[in-house]
Amino acid sequence: MTVIDVVMLAVAVLGGASAILVVVSRNVVHAALYLVVALISVAGTFLLLGAEFLAWTQVLVYVGAVIVLILFGLMLTRAPLGPMPQDNDHTRLAAALSVALFGFLAVLIMQAFGDTALPLSVTPTAAIGEILYVHWAFPFMVLGFFLTVALVGAIVLARREEGEGPEPLFDAEMDSERPTPAPTDVSTTPGVTSPSQEIRT
Amino acid sequence: MWQDVAITITVFLPLLGAGIITLVPKSREEAAKPIALVVSIVGFALALGILAGYDWDARGLQYTVDVPWINAIGARYHVGIDGISMPLFTLSYLLTFLCSVYAFHHIEEPGKPKAFLALMLLLQTGMAGTFIAFDLILFFVFWELVLVPMYFMIGVWGGPRREYAAVKFFLYTLFGSVFMLVAFLALYFTSEPNTFDMLALAQQGEAGVFTATFQRLAFLGIFLGFAIKVPMWPFHTWLPDAHTEAPTIGSVLLAGILLKMGTYGFVRIALPILPEGAMAFAPVIAVLAVIAIIYGALCCLAQTDLKRLIAFSSVGHMGFVMLGIATLTPVGINAAIFGMVAHGVITGMLFFVVGSVKDRYHTRAIADIGGGLFQTMPRMGAIFTFVAIASLGLPGLAGFPGEFAALLAAFQPAAGLVEAGHLTLYRVLMVLGAVGTVLTAGYFLWMMQRVNMGVAPQRWKDAGLADVSVIEWGTWLPLLLMTFFLGVLPGLVWGITTADVDALYSVFGG
Amino acid sequence: MQAAFPLVFAALLFCVGVFGVLSRRNAVLVLMSVELMLAAVTINLVTFGLLAADRGDVVLTGQIFALFVLAIGAAEVGVGLAIILLLYRNRATVNIDDADLMKY
Amino acid sequence: MISDHAWLIPALPAASALVIMLFGRRMARAGAEVGIAAIGVAFVLAVLVAVEVFTANVSAVAEVEAADTEEHALAGEQVASTGSLALTEAGEGEETAIPDGVEAFVNERAVTLTPLGDGFDIEAGIRVDGLAAMMFLLVTFVSLMVQVYSTGYMHGDPRITYFFTLLSVFTFSMLFLVIGNNLFMVLVGWELVGVCSYLLIGFWWEERDNSNAAIKAFLTTKLGDVGLMVGVVTMWAMFGTFNIGEIITAVREGVQAGGAPLDSGLLTFALIALFIGAIGKSAQFPLHTWLPDAMAGPTPVSALIHAATMVTAGVFLVARLYPVFQASQAALNVIAIIGAITLFMAGLLALVQDDVKRVLAYSTVSQLGYMVAALAFSYTAGIFHLFTHGFFKALLFLGSGSLIHAVHSNNMSDMGGLKKSMPWTFWTFLIGSLALAAIPPLAGFWSKDEVLAGALTAGGYTGNVVLILGGLGGMITAFYMTRVLYLVFAGEYRGAGHPHESPGSMKWPLVALAVPAVLIGFANLPFEQFHPTGFAAWTMFSLEYFEGHPAEFVLWLALGSTAAAVLGFVAGRALYRVAPAAERDPVLRLGLVTRVLENRYYLDHLYMGVIVRPLRDRLAVLAYWFNDRVIDRFVYLVGVGTQRIGQATYTYADQRGIDGAVNGIGVSANWSGGLLKFAQSGNVQFYAGAMFVGVFVFAVLFAAA
């Protein structure tokens, strides 16, 4: 047990705990903030693994940009910001599946890498740059193109088309066209009757 | 050069056409019709070119292309054409061509010719591809490709219960093809060396690479996939719904080509590759086929809806086809192929006529039409009568040779089946099948009495219904002529099929 | 350092993410859970990248791929949020079990 | 040789049908002229072919006789015959040597139409021999007369072009049936005439009764066709060919395909199956019920199709395969009994009819019974009766058409006293009636006498049954024809309007048909010295059969049958000389007997009640119910079952499913909630969960591996 192992353990505990809080938190804004912690601990892991550049990128992109984006998303969709159940009816099932998956993976990892020591070394940012722009140049450009496309796509999707009315509550036309009305309002669905799930606008 | 690319060009041309049609701007949707027409004409011309360059006397594949496709799983792009595929391949191009002509006459609500015709051309690629693929994976891809456009055709352009019918069609067929795919994979892993190639597998099947138990299991899987598509009794319940709700063109293509994919699959894949499995299942298939004949006819007698009646008649007719296949003799297989082509032409034609009648009367209920079609639309009535008589198997028209040869084969099934003691069963089935022709005649005549004959209700006389239009004549005349010439000269089909059928089915010692 | 530490950590994050994806109703929360899963994947990539470097990989495949995943993850959040926004605009909800138009 | 071109005989009407169909509407006489011209040419050809065939046959017989005399003179010893089968008929111990190279005339030519796989081919070919030549004569002549007649009878009908098209198509089909050299072609022609008959019976389709009759005719004969089809298929399986000549040769030699010995049980089965086809087409008991209803069609159609030609197809079929039938005494016995029953019971039915066409229809059934019964004993007797009957029955039908044309009613109760106003019709009708009643020396006498003589010579159980019933039948025939004659032509006119003689186009065909009705009987005088040059020689199918043919004149039989006919005539005259009022008609006052006869032995009730209605109204509905509620329900239940499995695993999906069912569009769409909603819940998380489970399982599997 070296020092670095201890630090790694601490980061892992922190990250794991905050990740779990992300998925169980009843308040969406809290969840987003826990996500920040989880992602920072991921960045910490990168640092411990010697991937310095990656760690800072992680902090910049995720903690900086993505989280802000998500918070904007929460705001724009007028999600109920207060504490309330955010889970559907399969929580137990999902939990069972996740735990089983984790157990299985953990066993597998311990079997395969239980006694493997990592050859730690710090990767200088300059080396990353050189390799990225020389050896990985083409995939990198494709990635750039891809990002542009995603950007344009996101704009097109989110843009309100001309003539489209201001956010209707229910798309009535869509339902009446079908012979079998598919219930869109969850509150009419038997079994999902919690009044707190009604949409508050 | 032409030999190498002919099939690929011909099969994928409609796909290209579909792509072009999607580029037509929404404001000028009508422009999609001429484009589709041109594409389907060129496709049909290419198919005829393939037919013209085909060597009728040779056995085996022609126009072969065999290149690696997905190396990881050993799937190859192996296409080609032989006497068994040729009639159906050509028929699919003919019907698509005629459908694109008919599209000028009428497309069901909600119109949108652009989307409709693009789907139709996509369907064409799938249909044609199924008949020329000689690799199981390639076959499967084309097979599944067909589902999507047909699903949308029924689901968007169909009748009142379109969604129900479309989903039923889609899921039912998909359900069957899952078993089929499993069987294909099992074949791949059992074959030695591993291969998806139909010809290689057939050779291995003949050489006895597969054990009897394996053959039966694999045959069962393939059987489910194909039997649902045919559809055989009792897997047929999707058919009346799909047919009834589908738009006219959809019904025509569904009856004309899609159903044949199942029977073709039996002939091409199930029987040659798994001879012992086929031998074990043939009596079962034969019994189911004859049940379908009688049962289909009885259900037809109970129908009050014209289109549904025609749909149920398909069940019976495909019963004859399956009876031919179940005999495992070259005569029976020839009968089946002829039956497929004839059914494609005749029932396709029937759906055209019924579609046009419905289009004018705005109802499919026989009681609402109330008789007197001869009075309101004499030419339509004459065509309807002609086709109905062809469908009930009048000699001299296309319906007869296939039916008769199937019965002929059923009297003397393959030697292996006789040795297994099934001779009496087959002969009884043959007599029952022949009785089925009487019932078939019964419901068609009764239908004609109720629709064509008698005095037309006054409201229809006053309605000023237009008789057969020029476009309709243009669409139907080729089919009417084919109905006649196939009946008079069955050699048009048998001349091309016999050599390959004989070669393929020598394994059953017929 | 033992290779197992980051790997188990990654597995934990991944499984938590799976749980979140399956159990959350709010689409934004689902998206967050997906981010957790992606993060887990990047950790794995970096870890295995180290092992690969030990065996002669000189082009830092693991780290570069992690970088790519990062970028794509960012793009995914953008597009995903746009879709959620659209959903919200059309159906006035971000509950994904209401977004079931793809049924029969 | 003109018979090489015999294919022209059916081809001409086919061509004319096409021409009339395409251009008939624009022609001055609606296409009738084309049809008549074509069939006229065909008739001339038929005469030429007949002359060639008949002279060839006669000279062949002469050669044999010459050789025979020679041999008797030289050695008087018997020479083993090659055709032992045909000679079993002879039974006189005297076998005849046939010189090499001398055969009954057969001109057969064929082209291969298509291979069928397995080495079998389908051929198209012609087989011109005595039988075919005779049928050509009959069909073309009657068809010619009927078409000429129709120009008058159908004058002014809006669908006259369609009518003449159908007549041409029918004539073609009938000739096609006759000329075919293989059973496949016979089957094709057989079905084609059936469909023409269907279309012509339903010609006036506005009336429900007519279309009902058409359907009944088609379906009843089609039921018989099942037998024909089974028979043809069995023959094919036994002999590996459809070719009639080859089948006959194979039967003679006693070998099946592949050299196996003849399976006589299977052969009998095949022959009886073929005969079931004949029962349907030739309206034999118990499938005769369609023929009287078929009178719903126009009268010329009844004359052509339902008297002279199509209904004789069954008789023709048996005659065509006669050497094969001879190989199975059991089949011949069945034929004899069916024929005898038919001829007797149909004769009785004719007694109580008021509709003149129905009288003739039942009489046709009865006469067909004679032909069929005759074939059990004697080939020549059967086809000779077919030949003569074709002429005089066509004459009678056209005569009745002339009556109907004049009084606008089919019923005899609306006629009476027409002798004065319609003399031509009367005299020709009288000739026809006398011929039918077998009064010497008209055609019917000679042919019916041949039938009875054949039965007498054959003796035995079946022979006696046919003889007795045939004799009684003769009396009944004379009686009902007398009744018709008196009710129609004697006494006072009872109908509406003023009847007058039909126009020339209808009159002259009657005269033209009356000539053969009188004279044709002399073609086959039943005396030894006439045989080698008469009808028996003309139409023989083999020299062996001709030589062994037992045709001799039995004086007491001829006198007896004539006496029976006269007795029937006298009785009819006594009862109907003064036409009784319809309700006082003696035959209608026999209580139970009349009731049974008027209800046609309740056979129609039986068929409707036991077969048609249960099948159409009960079984069909039941089958559809089964389809909807059992099979489709099963599909539904599979869906629901899958859903239930899902319920345990995915509560959510289950709730969507039940929700869907609750809100569903009612019972019929209920089941869609099952399978479909489960599989396509549309819930992303459900999909994702399924995916994770799948991946997980695979991962475990890989790890295990």
Image (spheres, coloured by chain):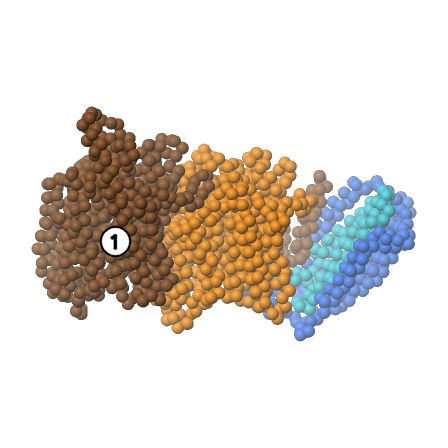
Chain colours: A blue, B orange, C cyan, D brown
Query: Quadrant of the image for the C terminus of chain D?
Result: top right
Query: Quadrant of the image for the N terminus of chain D?
Result: top left
- Which x, y percent locates residue C85? 71, 66
- Which x, y percent locates residue A87? 70, 59
Which residue type does callout 1 highlight?
Answer: Phe
Q: Is residue B477 left or right of residue B22?
A: left
When asked about the image quadrant of residue A74, the answer is: bottom right
Question: Is residue D397 or residue B281 the one in the foreground?
Answer: D397
- Which x, y percent locates residue B63? 59, 47
Residue shown at 38% from the left, 44% from the top:
D110
Residue shown at 52% from the left, 60% from the top:
B99
To which residue does mark 1 refer? Answer: D141
- Which x, y percent locates residue D625? 43, 54
Question: Is residue B52 or residue D72 the one in the foreground?
Answer: D72
Number of residues whose C-alpha sits closer than 10 Å to that of mark 1, classed few (under 14), some (14–19) or many (20 or more): many
Count all numbered tags in the image, as a single digit: 1
When asked about the image quadrant of residue B40, the answer is: bottom right
Q: Is residue C18 left or right of residue B51?
A: right
Q: Is residue D346 left or right of residue B425?
A: left
